[in-house]
Image: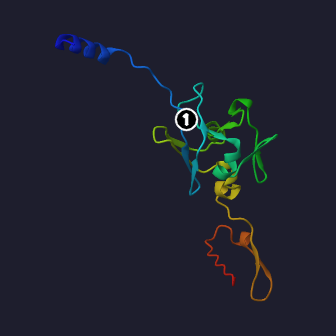
Amino acid sequence: MVRRDFLRVLGIASVAPRPVIAAPAAGATVLYNDRTVSLDQVGADPDHAADALWVRKIDLPKINEFELKPQGACRADVCIPIPKTMVRGTLFNLTAFARRVGQAVVADVRARAWSFGEIPIVRGAFLESRMAPEIVVPDRRGQPVRLSGFRGKKVLLVTWASW
């Protein structure tokens, strides 16, 4: 091959469109509530946001302790209705669920890492009101003392257990 022909072929190859090969969705790392969960299989969905994380339904309890039931996503006595668009076969859109419940989400899609903040619904009403739950303990004479009797005052409550 003549040098000029070689350079011409090389120049054409450098500007020719390269075929786009879609890589299958790799695993992901999920950070939530002081836990790191590594997932082997996650799904991708071009119809949703680029940061959408579709996890297997069976992986949901180990991520955030929710479980999918007919009435919705449930954890303890809290159930959140789930629209059909958040479920696709064996997959569940975890980022859409987080946005639905008001949970903060930070995603680094290239690093395949998602971090989820607290879920306001499950953290308890006392955090919203900043009111301690009612506590009743006996004093030295055996008379009940209620924490609510000290409302408006600063209280130091010390507990101890022998076990």
Q: Secondary structure at mark 1?
A: loop
Choose top left, top right, bottom left or bottom right for residue 84.
top right
133 or 117: nearer the eye?
Answer: 117
Q: Position of residue 64 (x, y in %)?
A: 65, 50
123 or 157: nearer the eye?
Answer: 123
Furthest residue toward bottom: 141
Is the image coloured rainbow, by chain, by secondary structure, or in one colour?
A: rainbow
Quadrant of the drawing holding the N terminus: top left
In the rendered view, does 47 fall on the left or right side of 14? right
Amino acid, disc 1: Ala
Residue at x-position 69% and y-position 72%: 150
Choose top left, top right, bottom left or bottom right for residue 89.
top right
1 or 98: nearer the eye?
Answer: 1
Q: Position of residue 56 (x, y in %)?
A: 67, 41
Q: Residues within 10 Å of mark 1 (few under 14, many from 20)?
A: some
Q: Position of residue 110 (x, y in %)?
A: 46, 38
Residue at x-position 68% and y-position 65%: 132
Residue at x-position 60% and y-position 41%: 41
97 shown above or below 78? above
Residue on which the image places disc 1: 25
